[in-house]
Image (cartoon, coloured by chain):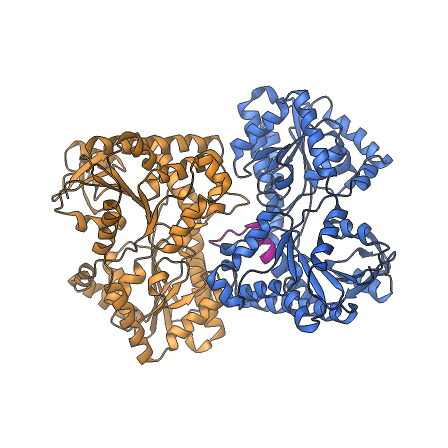
Chain colours: A blue, B orange
Amino acid sequence: MSGLVVVSNRGPLSFRQDEDGRPVPAGSGGGLAGTLRPLLTGTDATWVASSMNEADRLAAEAGLMSGEGLDIVTITPDADVYRMAYDVVSNATLWFSHHYLFDLPRRPRFDRHWYEAWEAYRLLNEQFADAVAEVAPPGAVVLVQDYHLSLTGRMLAQRRRDLRTVHFHHTPFGDAHAMRVLPSAPAGELLAGLDGFGACGFHTARWAAAFTSCYDDAELAAFAGTNGRPRAFHAPLGPDPAAIVEEASSEAVASARAELDGVVGDRRLILRVDRVELSKNLLRGFWAFEELLETRPHWRGAVVLLALAYPSREGLADYLAYRSEVEHTAARINERWGTADWVPVVLDVADDRDRSVAALTRYDVLMVNPIRDGMNLVAKEGPLVNTHDGVVVLSREAGAWEELHPAAVGVNPFDVTGTAAALDLALTMDPAQRAQRADALREIVLGRTAADWLADLLAQAEQLPGSG
Amino acid sequence: MSGLVVVSNRGPLSFRQDEDGRPVPAGSGGGLAGTLRPLLTGTDATWVASSMNEADRLAAEAGLMSGEGLDIVTITPDADVYRMAYDVVSNATLWFSHHYLFDLPRRPRFDRHWYEAWEAYRLLNEQFADAVAEVAPPGAVVLVQDYHLSLTGRMLAQRRRDLRTVHFHHTPFGDAHAMRVLPSAPAGELLAGLDGFGACGFHTARWAAAFTSCYDDAELAAFAGTNGRPRAFHAPLGPDPAAIVEEASSEAVASARAELDGVVGDRRLILRVDRVELSKNLLRGFWAFEELLETRPHWRGAVVLLALAYPSREGLADYLAYRSEVEHTAARINERWGTADWVPVVLDVADDRDRSVAALTRYDVLMVNPIRDGMNLVAKEGPLVNTHDGVVVLSREAGAWEELHPAAVGVNPFDVTGTAAALDLALTMDPAQRAQRADALREIVLGRTAADWLADLLAQAEQLPGSG
């Protein structure tokens, strides 16, 4: 696939600086890049990404951004431009908008500082578009990932009409109301930018419909200068089953599992594994667990909620505040309900992948209750490695719901009482039904892998006109 | 119109207790009731409303809820039931939902206490439905007002199939996403309750479309048990022009105007008149004014922002917190920009109608920038009494925008920079254009009065099947 170019903000390799300031590998980029990298290794694809920090920049200069059969091209944006584009626009505006996270009476605040950040976002998108235009072979398929690069569609169309460009959002997409919250000219620019791609993909039909509906809003369409709906499709992403099963069988995971067994003992285990992220709904998860203890006294002392919640985006004040609320809520519940030999909520904010995988093998109930989530891969990874016929309590607002709903216990994530009832239902389900559901979940997840997702994107690209 | 029954939470008369605890009139109910009362006086209509406090209850018992050619029937709910239904469900849930005010990562919190409040809301709606079913003449037209009474449609349909019922929301209506935030069973009950009316009305086509779109969401429709869309219409409400013009010519207003002239002097006046209410967007109004001073230094010392903001719903913690933020923001701006002889922001939280009307006669710019608003009558009252060819800077998310947009200066209410630019544009507009726009606004408002609105509702009712 030498005609394939993948574009994402974060690249497949990331670096940190050692004591002497030299760049050394910091593991795989994780997240999206971690999923994509094994799929592309050896394909001779070109991957265009930005250096995210000083270590990445040094590594790129030293030629360390090379990769196993992957040609990695690194953008090196100005640090201030990058910070404004990434923190202010991508993470504090577009992420919030697509996930409905704004406290609208107070946030967002689109003032002149924000408009400067928008200029930076445009500039960063231009840098990406320039790099792609320079390196892409004639008629190449270009797969652009996520909300950081929304404007590159139109930019690429202007630079290289021969390319077949496909964008994919790993987030949900805000509807017309959410887009109307953005200042009108930037909202129009965003929609025009995405309209410039040959096609735009999403994890679910619901997000694709939210996206195309924005182009039906007369005011938004006027600012975008568009006429009609862009081409959209949905292609759900799944984990690589072999990789996670192999991971689960490692020594490190076995040792983490032994440690976990010591903590949980013969109690039932409700697990959640998330970033400390406003969309993940940690607070209502805790409140629901507390209502379970309050209203069903027989669970007191008999169940543990293990919350593996690794810190995220701590450069944003909102996330620091949220982490503090999460920690205080867990502590308050433990103070109120805990006993000498029972800690109701075990909150661990260390980023320890082995421990997470170990916990996934052991849960009785996996609680995945985001208020809105593009997909949520944890809901799919859990059933692949779990050995307890664990039940998945799943938010109907997670993208994964569209595939998993026949075998999961659904919750309205805002409904604390309903979530408590779902936890109770999951904990009391009879063994035969648990086994049946666990099998069904596994079957659904095995039926659709990351490779299928990539194949769908490539098939979309092949259908586009192009001179390749 | 002896066959007419009007139903609203707040009645046309309200009372307070004097020093001896006896109920004495506390003026007209204001707001909606204040608008409806003159329209209905002398029609022999029956008005069903609830007593909202102890004084109202005593007055009803003493037979003081009589009225000029109006038969007033008072419901006396249990105080706890009323508090839960009114504070928790109507104001802290449905109002928030229809105006998109929730900080979703944290609020709402639908726990078992909220479910108790929902029971109370249902009970209160049943009390209303029972009272209406008892007093309504055969085949009567029943006009039910606002979100407090959403469930009475189905209840009335079950009790009295002969009635022709029309509901009218004076708020916007949340779309399917907002309704999905509510717990599923209550959301379904709400939509089923409204579907029970013969027709549902809104101030704008946009709110009516948001309402009917909820019935297209498969999940919501399943919980509602509905099939297809209910009958919806839009009928914008306007002020009574004669009444406000008469009010503006009173002695009290003249004296308030003289006082105001002293405060403003020969400076330009930007005015806003609101309740201290999260949807009104006071904070961004102040931020925009500050950005105006920051970026256009010639306005420093030359313009005053008068914010008449009377307290609202101070029983809810959210409103107390918001009031405090509003006060601190005004104080901070005054500290930063004020001089010995210039206070940039004059914030007055007294509820003084004469002062408000006086200010409406005097503004150069009227700032009406709600993040979402059913209609906003201030935007229509201003042009009727203003004597300065004042410009209206109007949020595109206010219902009034649908009628006034040809002659107002539109703003995206979330866009602080855009709002600052709109204020500057309004302040610098040449006199001929100001006069032309002021005339156009007045003409639009005079073209559609409160009586037209009532006539539309009655016409909708007449089209319904009924045995009257």
Please state if B230 lies on the left or on the right of A136 as rendered: left
Measuring 40% from the left and 48% from the top, which residue is drawn there? B173
Q: Position of residue B172 (x, y in %)?
A: 38, 51
Is A105 magenta? The answer is yes
Would you say B421 lies left or right of A337 here? Answer: left
**Quarter of the figure with the C terminus of chain A:** bottom right
Q: Which residues are magenta?
A: A92-107
For residue B228, above or below residue B414: above
Q: Is residue B77 visible?
A: no
Q: Toward the viewer: A262 or B175?
A: B175
Give the number of callouts.
Answer: 0
B254 is within the stretch colored magenta = no
Split into 4 quadrants, where in the image is the N terminus of chain A? Answer: bottom right
Residue B367 appears in which quarter of the rendering?
Answer: bottom left
- The vertical placement of A454 against B84, above or below, is below
Quarter where residue B386 is shown: bottom left
Please provide percent x and percent y for residue B454. Answer: 23, 51
The percent position of residue B463, horizontal first and vertical second, equals 25, 46
B357 vs A236, left or right, is left
